[in-house]
């Protein structure tokens, strides 16, 4: 993520940056901000070799035995924070940790112009994660600043929580920075009954509403732009079409639900089938209902009642997932008394997503009534679709295109084929940029991964793609700094 902060007294700053970037790309200069490019001319040692080694080192820091897991404020997360801070210091950055555990790094002297370019991603992971998601964005950002040694505007942030695994609520770190995290979040509990406030106190944070308020960027800081550099997020289009990098034009909106199905607990061998109020069977039917609803929405949505005028394009990005299902008492010889499951609904079109949520909620009540079980649908999280800023997107697109052109003489065939062309994509995944968009403008860069797979130990990114991502970020930062000067 990279945050561009510009005071209102400079209304033309984006025009100047765009124009300057255009000129730099037109000439494809081999020198950045007066610094001769290192190694073979492209900073291979730092942007590829060192970055890849650090990715592997961070992968080893896990709370799981035999798999990667780093959740918010867990012991593994604290250990990862210490390592990330050491890397920031190695790059010459002054560091601090805010009251939500986000790590900030910047060169001294501090930026006196109140303009900032924040770059980074999140350090938490899903359970059984790959080593690139989140981590690549952070380490590439540190590597880029290590190369540029550019005081003032550029900063790095490693966000403490984006995935929302531990507390089932996403963007704890970035929402705090954006100033949109409610005080009530401190009382949200994980599965063990430990609250956000508890874990913050355990790690020596104040964990008060006042401390939470200190995290957010203040209006007087003049924040008005944000370019978000993020890690690989399963871009099948990139993986299949041979493009190392892609630029994001928007992020799908998402809704998370929890469905609670209550039935009658009983003995598996003595309760006749006709007399059962089985919440497991009802839950199974609801899961299949969700699948049908999201695969063939036009069969369920009527034009007059639910705006069935949705176009094929607006429905194309609709995806629905049941990722967790829990039963009680969860014994092989007991008919469950209760079944809970999660629902994740995403769409590029907010009206489509909202309509699917309403339609599924109605179908839940209907089908539970038919099966004589009791059901409730809880809304856990909702985020509107987030468009990326057009100018920042154009700058990232040019930075990516220029990078591939610079690498072409020694690059693999896939780079030569994609040089000068950068796909512009929609993202179905959630990102910290969605929270930061409440504060400022956002832009994102994607890196291809094999098969488009993310959130999995099968996540795989070529070393040269890591290199390309770092070099694109160097270009992007340098062009912005050149425009400012």
Image (spheres, helix red, strand yellow):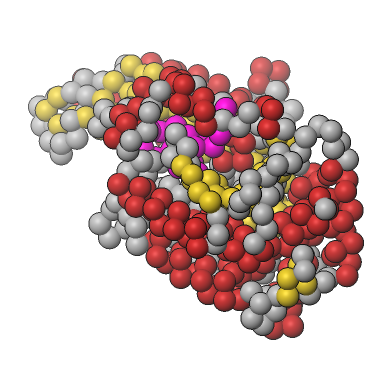
Nearer to us in this view, 264 or 208: 208
- Residue 230 lies left or right of residue 364; in this view the side is right
Q: Is there any visible trace of residue 54 in the rendered image?
A: yes
Toward the viewer: 424 or 277? 424
Camera sees residue 181: no
Q: Is residue 478 within the magenta segment?
A: no
Along the line of sight, the residue nearer the viewer: 155 or 187: 155
Q: Residue at x 74, y 28 (%)?
A: 309
Q: Residue furthest front?
A: 109
Stretch in magenta: 158-179
Q: Position of residue 341 (x, y in %)?
A: 36, 32
Residue 172 falls inside the magenta stretch = yes
In this view of the protein, which residue sits in the foreground, 146 or 475?
146
- Marker count (numbered): 0
In the displayed structure, 380 sits above or below 136; it is above
Q: Quadrant of residue 312?
A: top right
Q: Residue at x 11, y 28 (%)?
A: 267
Residue drawn at point x = 87 percent, y = 56 percent: 20
Q: Is residue 137 above or below residue 7?
A: below
- Relative vertical location of residue 478 with respect to residue 71 in this rendering, above or below: below
Write the residue at 84% across / 33% down.
Answer: 9
x, y percentage for residue 330?
A: 19, 35
Q: Is residue 116 left or right of residue 429?
A: right
The image position of residue 41, as x and y in percent, is 70, 79
Give the left or right position of residue 206, taking residue 44 as reference. left
Give x and y (percent) for residue 472. 69, 63
Q: Left or right: 293 with respect to 21? A: left
């Amino acid at each position: 993520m990279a945050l561009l902060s510009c005071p209102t007294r400079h209304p033309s700053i984006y025009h100047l940056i765009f124009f300057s970037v255009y000129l730099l790309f037109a000439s494809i200069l081999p020198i950045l901000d007066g610094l001769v490019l290192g190694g073979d001319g492209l900073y291979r040692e730092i942007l590829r070799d060192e970055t890849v080694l650090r990715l592997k080192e961070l992968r080893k820091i896990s709370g799981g035995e035999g798999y990667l897991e780093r959740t918010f404020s867990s012991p593994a997360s604290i250990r990862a924070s210490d390592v990330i801070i050491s890397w920031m210091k190695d790059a010459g950055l002054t560091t601090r940790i805010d009251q939500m555990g986000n790590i900030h790094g910047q060169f001294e002297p501090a930026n006196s112009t109140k303009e900032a370019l924040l770059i980074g991603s999140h350090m938490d992971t899903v359970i059984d994660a790959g080593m690139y998601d989140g981590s690549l964005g952070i380490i590439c950002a540190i590597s880029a600043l290590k190369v540029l040694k550019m005081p003032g505007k550029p900063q790095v942030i490693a966000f403490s929580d984006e995935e929302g695994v531990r507390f089932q609520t996403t963007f704890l770190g970035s929402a705090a920075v954006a100033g949109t995290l409610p005080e009530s979040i401190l009382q949200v509990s994980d599965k063990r009954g430990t609250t956000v406030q508890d874990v913050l106190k355990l790690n020596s944070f104040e964990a008060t509403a006042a401390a939470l308020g200190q995290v957010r960027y203040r209006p007087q800081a003049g924040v008005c732009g944000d370019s978000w550099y993020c890690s690989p997020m399963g871009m099948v289009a990139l993986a299949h079409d041979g493009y190392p990098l892609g630029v994001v034009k928007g992020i799908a909106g998402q809704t998370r639900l929890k469905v609670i199905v209550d039935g009658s607990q009983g003995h598996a061998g003595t309760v006749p089938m006709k007399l059962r109020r089985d919440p497991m069977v009802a839950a199974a039917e609801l899961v299949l209902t969700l699948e049908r609803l999201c695969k063939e929405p036009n069969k369920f949505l009527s034009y007059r009642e639910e705006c069935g005028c949705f176009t094929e394009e607006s429905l194309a990005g609709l995806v629905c997932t049941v990722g967790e299902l829990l039963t009680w008492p969860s014994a092989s010889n007991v008919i469950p008394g209760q079944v809970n499951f999660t629902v994740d609904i995403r769409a590029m079109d907010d009206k489509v997503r909202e309509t699917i949520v309403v339609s599924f909620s109605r179908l839940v009540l209907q089908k539970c009534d038919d099966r004589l079980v009791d059901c409730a649908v809880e809304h856990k999280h909702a985020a509107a679709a987030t468009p990326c800023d057009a100018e920042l997107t154009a700058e990232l697109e040019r930075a990516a295109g220029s990078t591939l052109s610079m690498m072409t003489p020694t690059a693999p065939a896939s780079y030569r084929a994609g040089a000068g062309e950068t796909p512009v994509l929609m993202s179905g995944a959630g990102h910290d940029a969605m929270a930061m968009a409440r504060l400022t403008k956002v832009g994102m860069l994607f890196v291809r991964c094999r098969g488009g797979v993310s959130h999995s130990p099968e996540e795989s990114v070529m070393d040269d793609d890591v290199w390309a991502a770092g070099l694109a970020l160097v270009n992007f930062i340098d062009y912005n700094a050149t425009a400012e000067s």
